[in-house]
Amino acid sequence: MSASRSRMLAALLVCLAWGCALERPRPMPFEADAPPFRVHAQDAASAQGVLADAAKALAAARTLPGMRTRESIDVRVTSAQGKAAAGSTRWLGDPRRREGAWIELSLNQDPQEQRFLLGHELAHALFDETWQLLPQIVEEGLADHAGETASPACGAARRLAHAIRLCSWTGPGLELVENGRVVETLRARLEPDSLPEPARMLELDGRSYHDVKPAENRELLYAFGYLIVERIGVVKLRELCVAARAAGRKRLAPKELLEAARLDPSDRRAWIPAIQALVGERELAAYRLRRPAAR
């Protein structure tokens, strides 16, 4: 899959920056607020535009169980200047405690991207201590569920991008079938020799997953985390976290997650039907919308 095709299909690059923030964010010239939100931006229109979507994105994040309440949520908005839209959740103080947080968004003019990113980042900001037993990439997959609820259109494009990367990892790529024949195979440009094994992927934390390179390989981590959430289901995943926390554990083990997801790490080709199940008519419609000349 070419770099330009990857950008169109993925719709956005969700880059999470975790770690201890040593200082509070600098002020910005414009602000719009409606509790619990304060949106800061370089211009009034951007601040008001994000604020208009914030309540819906918060409701999307709260469809997930185990979400904490925050009295105030600061969102800082900058222009992506034509680059891929991105979001990050930053922590004040110890990131393991997640006592204070703010959200950084780098946006273009696509309102669907904006809603997806808001939902995704708000989920990170609101996950409670029990969800913190998830590996980093599985938390990313769970946050994508909130993004999908906030923007089904962008969520469909994101699911398709996940499927393409996963099928490129486990086989020749994602095959599009019409009338019983393969009409196109969509591929991602991964570097398989640089990828960790599945169990190791589930051991990466908010810092070490940034060491996986190049960027397309790192995007595969998000796709793998999303597949695990889809295979286990949100309710069952929550139950696993609750049980592990009750037992005094700090993390879910890679082996138990892979077993719960029914994914045998020694036979990744057997995962292909599960990956293909991520793609339905909504995802294909998103592809046709972005690639009209290809259909």
Image (cartoon, rainbow, N blue to C red):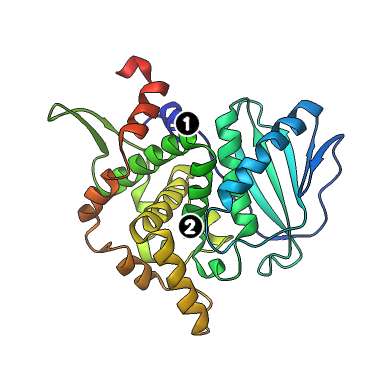
Q: Nearer the viewer, residue 166 or 103?
A: 103
Q: Residue at x 24, y 40 (%)?
A: 172
Residue 237 at x, y = what percent?
42, 65
Q: Judge left or right: residue 111 versus residue 285.
A: right
Alpha carbons under labels 2 and 1: distance apart: 20 Å
Q: Residue at x 40, y 22 (%)?
A: 289
Q: Nearer the viewer, residue 279 or 94?
A: 279
Q: Residue at x 76, y 26 (%)?
A: 45
Q: Quadrant of residue 52?
A: top right
Q: Can you see residue 252?
A: no
Above or below, 235 against 165 in this view is: below
Which element carries disc 2, helix, strand or loop? helix
Q: Nearer the viewer, residue 122 or 14?
A: 122
Residue 137 at x, y = what percent?
48, 57
Q: Residue at x 65, y 56 (%)?
A: 125
Mark 2: which amino acid? Ile
Residue extending farthest to the left is: 180
Residue 180 at x, y = what percent?
12, 30
- Residue 137 is labelled as 2
| Neighbourhood count class around disc 2 (C-alpha, 10 Å): few under 14, some 14–19, many 20 upward | many
The residue labelled by disc 1 is 7
Q: Quadrant of the N terminus?
A: top left
Residue 165 at x, y = what percent?
36, 43
Q: Quadrant of residue 95?
A: bottom right
Q: Quadrant of the C terminus?
A: top left
Q: Nearer the viewer, residue 231 or 275?
A: 231
Which element carries disc 1, helix, strand or loop? helix
Q: Judge left or right: residue 92 versus residue 19.
A: right
| Neighbourhood count class around disc 1 (C-alpha, 10 Å): few under 14, some 14–19, many 20 upward | some
Q: Quadrant of residue 268?
A: bottom left
